[in-house]
Image (spheres, rainbow, N blue to C red):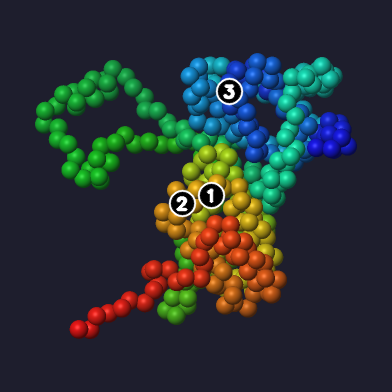
């Protein structure tokens, strides 16, 4: 960071004060994380805008608890104060620093400075590339009602009393009890787990109906191969026709998975990526949407370790087969030439970086040789 940028951020940047955090706790903001030391009090020089703050409690053996995070839109010169609750191993929900108490932090800003770590500005462009389409209103719509992104779901614990414990014990001792003979039978014997209300991410649900009312058999067949009807319905009914918000959810889902460690985020990201890649007829009507989509994917692919695709995605060849369909759709469509050029460059880049082959025919579409002898 050059001296002018550092001075500007020191004067204009936001501050996140995090008090009473135990030594060794994992703390992070955006694409940067650390294990805090004894003098840690927070982070300074945070560029204004939307950021993702997260943390994990850590025991004496160095084992970390599941990650918890939240999105926050920092304003210029804003000071945000949070305090750790050792009993909850989380941010104290009952402490809200405002008014005169918050003014004290503003007045003591210089004295507090040495206890604050500087925001790693060298990674700021990377964060912006991952969150460029996300808005505060979109995050507010998608995040859980309690505002926390949890890597592990919170479930409602069933109440336990003497009678229920006695019944469970009798069931264990019942010699007539038989082991389940199928997965379905075993599943039926498991307790009914319900997610704690207000803690689940409110991802947009994709329309289940793939074709409009009154479609002919030919139209139904076309819609089963081309997802444009679903895309148009989704944009109209859930995003008020704001294309940037759809891409914002693609980025939100990706960040929840990659940084928040929420697997449901990966699942939603796959659904949205596949929807966009399989909407062939939409390519000519939504040029800017798909130009921006290629840009979003370009930066996301670069932030995933290369072996990620081998260990997870390549098990079902999701990304390679989905992008192969996308590139083929673009070339065969009447899409704008600017989109075609950008897709060709992206395809060449992926082939060079990951050695992915987008030109060979997938096995399931290859012709079958029939022996007539």
- Mark 3 or mark 1, which has the lower sequence index? 3
Marks 2 and 1 in Cβ contact (< 8 Å): yes
Instruction: Provide the residue designation for mark 2.
Output: 310
Residue 363 lies left or right of residue 6; in this view the side is left
Which quadrant holds the C terminus? bottom left
Q: Is residue 10 visible?
A: yes
Picture coordinates of residue 310, whole percent (x, y): 46, 51
Picture coordinates of residue 120, whole percent (x, y): 72, 35
Name the residue furthest bottom.
Answer: 372
**Residue 136 is drawn in which quadrant?**
top right
Name above or below for residue 285 compared with residue 18.
below
Question: Crowdedness of circle 2 by 10 Å Cα count: few (<14), some, many (20+)?
Answer: few
Residue that appears at 51% across and 71% down: 359
Identify the mark at residue 306; answer none if there is no mark: 1
Q: Which one is in front, 36 or 75?
A: 36
- Mark 2 or mark 3, which has the lower sequence index? 3
Name above or below for residue 135 compared with residue 351.
above
Residue that appears at 19% across and 27% down: 171
Instruction: Provide the residue designation for mark 3.
Output: 25
Question: Crowdedness of circle 1 by 10 Å Cα count: few (<14), some, many (20+)?
Answer: few
Question: Crowdedness of circle 3 by 10 Å Cα count: few (<14), some, many (20+)?
Answer: many
Residue 74 lies left or right of residue 230; in this view the side is right
* Label 3 residue SS: loop
């Amino acid at each position: 960071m050059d001296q002018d940028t550092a001075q500007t951020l020191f004067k204009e940047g936001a501050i996140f004060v995090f008090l009473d955090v135990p030594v060794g706790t994992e703390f992070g903001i955006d694409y940067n994380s650390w294990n805090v030391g004894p003098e840690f009090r927070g982070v300074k020089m945070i560029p204004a805008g939307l950021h993702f703050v997260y943390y994990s409690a850590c025991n004496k053996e160095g084992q970390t608890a599941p990650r918890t995070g939240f999105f926050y839109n920092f304003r210029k010169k804003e000071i945000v104060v949070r305090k750790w609750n050792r009993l909850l191993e989380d941010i104290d929900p009952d402490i809200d620093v405002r008014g005169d108490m918050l003014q004290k932090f503003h007045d003591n800003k210089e004295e507090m400075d040495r206890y604050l770590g500087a925001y790693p500005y060298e990674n700021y462009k990377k964060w912006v590339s991952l969150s460029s389409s996300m808005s505060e209103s979109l995050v507010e719509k998608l995040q859980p009602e309690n505002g926390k992104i949890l890597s592990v779901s919170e479930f409602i614990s069933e109440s336990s009393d003497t009678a229920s414990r006695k019944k469970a014990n009798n069931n264990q001792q019942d010699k007539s009890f038989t082991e389940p003979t199928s997965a379905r039978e075993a599943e039926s014997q498991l307790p009914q787990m319900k997610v704690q209300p207000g803690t689940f991410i409110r991802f947009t649900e994709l329309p289940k109906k793939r074709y409009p009312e009154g479609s002919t058999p030919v139209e139904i067949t076309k819609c089963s191969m081309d997802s444009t009807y679903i895309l148009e319905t989704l944009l109209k009914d859930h995003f008020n026709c704001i294309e940037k918000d759809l891409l914002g959810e693609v980025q939100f889902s990706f960040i929840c998975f990659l940084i928040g460690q929420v697997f449901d985020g990966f699942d939603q990201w796959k659904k949205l990526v596949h929807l966009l890649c399989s909407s062939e007829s939409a390519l000519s009507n939504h040029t800017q949407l798909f130009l921006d989509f290629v840009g979003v994917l370009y930066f996301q692919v670069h932030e995933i370790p290369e072996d990620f695709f081998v260990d997870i995605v390549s098990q079902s060849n999701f990304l390679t087969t989905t992008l192969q369909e996308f590139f083929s759709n673009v070339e065969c469509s009447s899409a704008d030439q600017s989109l075609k050029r950008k897709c060709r460059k992206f395809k060449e880049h992926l082939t060079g970086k990951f050695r992915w082959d987008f030109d060979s025919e997938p096995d399931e579409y290859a012709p079958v040789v029939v022996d007539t002898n």
